[in-house]
Amino acid sequence: MNLTEILRILSQAEGVSGWESPAGEKALELLRDYCPDAKIDPSGNIIGHMGNTLENAPHILLDAHLDQVGLIVTAITDEGFVRADHVGGIDMRLMPAQNLLLHGKKTIPGVAASVPPHLIGGEQKVLDVTELLIDTGYSKAELEEILSPGDRISFDTPFQILQGDRIAARSMDDRCGMAAILYALELLKNKTLPCKVSVLFSAQEEVGECGAETAGYTINPDMAIAVDVTFAMGHGDDPVKCGKLGGGPMIGISPTLSREISDSLISAAEGQNIPWQPEVMSGTTGTNADRFSVSRGGVRSCTLSIPLRYMHTPSEVISLGDVENTGRLLAAWLKEGHYAE
């Protein structure tokens, strides 16, 4: 498997929350190499199954969310500017002069309007999203033939390979989690597993973990692991709140997570000499694990997080090695049955 190319394909597919179908089609194509029964459910989730089919085999769910943060069209002004609101958490500090793609009847480019510094007299202000204007070059009449309220807007940024094993791209949150799961499935190909595995690429995580809630109920696993991203140390960041980029996946430890699964993932990592880091949280995790843990009568759940810099921006940075080691850890954990200890 060319993991870099998988990341490129997934990150460049469009999938702002609630409009994940372009990315979903790419994900479905990739997942069917391992789960021939994979399909898209009514919520836009991608679900597939593999592994042991015996009735008493443990049923484990691997999840990574499919959607990306973005914007939604709310109006078109008389001057021909597009107004928008956020879909998921957008850092408005970086929006001026940002290159964007507006997805209507056709996809058109746009630029977030920016006032030159010469005209603001040194005044610094972070725009509220309701003040954001997007310039496309079209008139109002022309835009009304292309765009409608509710159309999605995504960042228009390239996939870039940086020095070493670093990659910068949009939507690494959480397409790198999807890539890690696909890599684990590749490592498990043609292997006999002691468990049944369901794979979920979930929709609408950034707007309330909605896809995980419906899919968790449908799949009804015994255990679940949400593979997502977490904060990687950057310049001046608090090391207590961040992981080390290139330091390996972060294993979740929280009052709302299963300590047994956390410990079993640690055991698997140390048994295979896979680098790992602890991610200690004092309550809920802000991931799909929060939904799985209270699904039906309760599901033992845990998080496995990939360190990422510049979260919810157009250029999120990850380490390819962290994605690979996350996949290695998942594969070792599933194959060796550590969860049953």
Image (tube, rainbow, N blue to C red):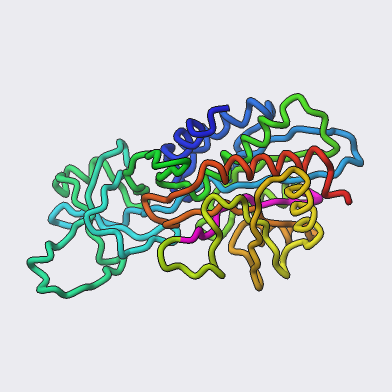
* Quadrant in the picture for the N terminus: top right
Q: What residue is at 37 percent from the left and 39 percent from the top? A: 160
Residue sticking out furthest to the left = 118
For residue 293, which quarter of the picture? bottom right
For residue 188, which quarter of the picture? top right
Is residue 124 visible in the rendered structure shown here?
yes
Dominant secondary structure (helix, strand or loop) of the stretch shown in magenta = strand
Q: Is residue 194 above or below residue 111?
A: above
Q: What residue is at 67 percent from the left and 57 percent from the top? A: 251
Q: What residue is at 16 percent from the left and 52 percent from the top? A: 80
Is residue 42 visible in the rendered structure shown here?
no
Write the start and end of the magenta stretch as one range. 220-233
Does the magenta segment cover residue 228?
A: yes
Residue sticking out furthest to the right = 56
Q: Position of residue 57 (x, y in %)?
A: 88, 40
Q: What residue is at 48 percent from the left and 41 percent from the top? A: 165
Q: Position of residue 55 (x, y in %)?
A: 90, 38
- The foreground one among 169 and 37 is 169
- Relative horizontal placement of residue 240, taking residue 141 as reference (left or right): right
Does the magenta segment cover residue 15?
A: no
Q: Position of residue 44 (x, y in %)?
A: 56, 43
